[in-house]
Image (cartoon, rainbow, N blue to C red):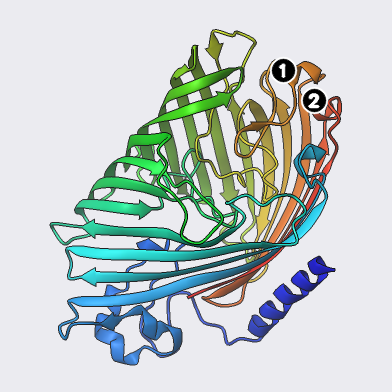
Amino acid sequence: MTQYIAAAWILVLASTQAFASPVPQEQSQTGYALPPIEITRWSEDYRPLADSADELTGLDRLKWLPISRDNGIAVSFGGSLREQFESYQNREFGFAEGDDDAYLLHRLLLHANVRFGTQARAFIEFGNSLIVDRDATPSPVDENELYFAQGFIDLTPTGDTDGLRLRLGRQELPLGSGRLVSLRDGPNTRLSFDAARLTLAQDRWSVDTFVAAPVELRPGVFDDRFNKETVFWGAYATFPSVIDVQGGMDVYYLGIDRDDRRFGVAEGDETRHSVGLRLFGERRGFDYNLESVGQFGTLGASDIRAWTIASDIGYTWEQHPWQPRIGLRANISSGARGNGGTTETFDPLFPNNSYFSEAAVLSPSNLIDVNPSLSLRPTERLELLAMWDFVWLTSGDDAAYGPPGVPLFDPADSLGRFVGHSLSAKGVYQFDRHSSLTLAYTRFLAGEAVTSTGGDDVDYLALWYEFKF
């Protein structure tokens, strides 16, 4: 019964926006320019509104509240509310606790951004994440009653967007396309790090260096902890592409040291190094995102030798009213081949597990997948997406993995390498600048690699409403 009440509640919230007056993304009804609402809320900059503060209306008034008379010190407030109904049949192919389950996810994030002139600012964000009526035991990613999501200071000596910036404190740390370090926006609790980050930016290039530890989540009230068992560091540089004047190129090194790690065929303390190259861009309707990563290091007594190659290309008919885009993702990541002295299973570190579909059934380790897609925009407010993903094991001596890198079955019991194929559909309706409604469905038809170990097909359905201000 709870699941029906949850779905009805989301539809009621959405219906309050269904007949709302349309508000374009970049312009208010009174004429002042509005910066876009970003997925990374700390990247929003409302300083251009300083001269229009008297014109701000409604929730926009919270975006520039001067504390000093000269606007040198000012604060802006914002937040988001997400109410989500989610249902699984045979979660993790039936291997998981509570494999048939339906429940409600609730997430509330509230933040304040205080600017001290052009050279310093402080950003703080609190979160409340709850899960209702789940059969399985909730993890801290699902349920975190009240937590300190972010809290950092920025110091910018030059006072410009370009130049040097030092960021200290708890912060999100998305890098590139999120293949190795993502926001983890799909689950209830986003990914945060306790970190020091130094950024040097100039025109179209930037270099980030950082040392960080992922926050150790706990389900209570302000009880998340500094993670003493993991150290994460790296350098990430973005430059204009050498092959396309409208494209870009990322070059990066990421290092991680973790205690008591078990992955692939090895276990013990781990030191893993990742070196990557990414090329991306778009021109005349064609877009591309190509990435390759090599990994080396040690895990217990084993040497690490792992890699991945990923591609996402597409073409958009920009002149067509519906702007159709056909896309193709093709990915391969290495897996163990039975050599006890070397572990070859690729570790995606902190990935976007919704990369293959919203169902987040698989983690991108020891996989080959080919994923054609079609997206349409029938109206300015509605976006539709359909995907068909075919998945194989790279190595039959290794398992398929579910988030967060947990083997789904013993490869010794598995026959064949075909994991299966999934059909996914997703629709997003943007009511206005602040609110949207999303419906997503995935049907994963298990292949012999899964069914031979007792696994079965997966059905996933989700409906969520999100409001941001």
Q: Quadrant of residue 187?
A: bottom right
Q: Residue at coordinates 46% horizontally, 52% vertically from top-left? A: 224
Residue 323, given in percent of the width and then of the height, sits at: 61, 60
Residue 205 visible, this angle: no
The image shows residue 358, relative to residue 210, as above or below, that is below
Q: Amino acid at mark 2?
A: Ala
Graded by Cα atoms within 10 Å as few (under 14), some (14 to 19) or many (20 or more), the crowding at tag 2 reads many
Mark 2 lies on residue? 449
Labels 1 & 2 near each other (Cβ < 8 A) = yes
| Count of residue discs | 2
Residue 283, given in percent of the width and then of the height, sits at: 46, 48
- SS under mark 2: helix
Q: Residue at coordinates 44% horizontally, 42% vertically from top-left? A: 280
Q: Residue at coordinates 46% horizontally, 22% vertically from top-left? A: 269
Q: Nearer the viewer, residue 455 or 228?
A: 228
Residue 454, given in percent of the width and then of the height, sits at: 86, 30
Mark 1 lies on residue? 396
Residue 75 visible, this angle: yes
In the rendered view, does 4 fall on the left or right side of 50?
A: right
In the rendered view, does 456 fall on the left or right side of 238?
A: right
Residue 214, given in percent of the width and then of the height, sits at: 43, 44
Q: Quadrant of the N terminus?
A: bottom right
Q: Amino acid at mark 1?
A: Gly
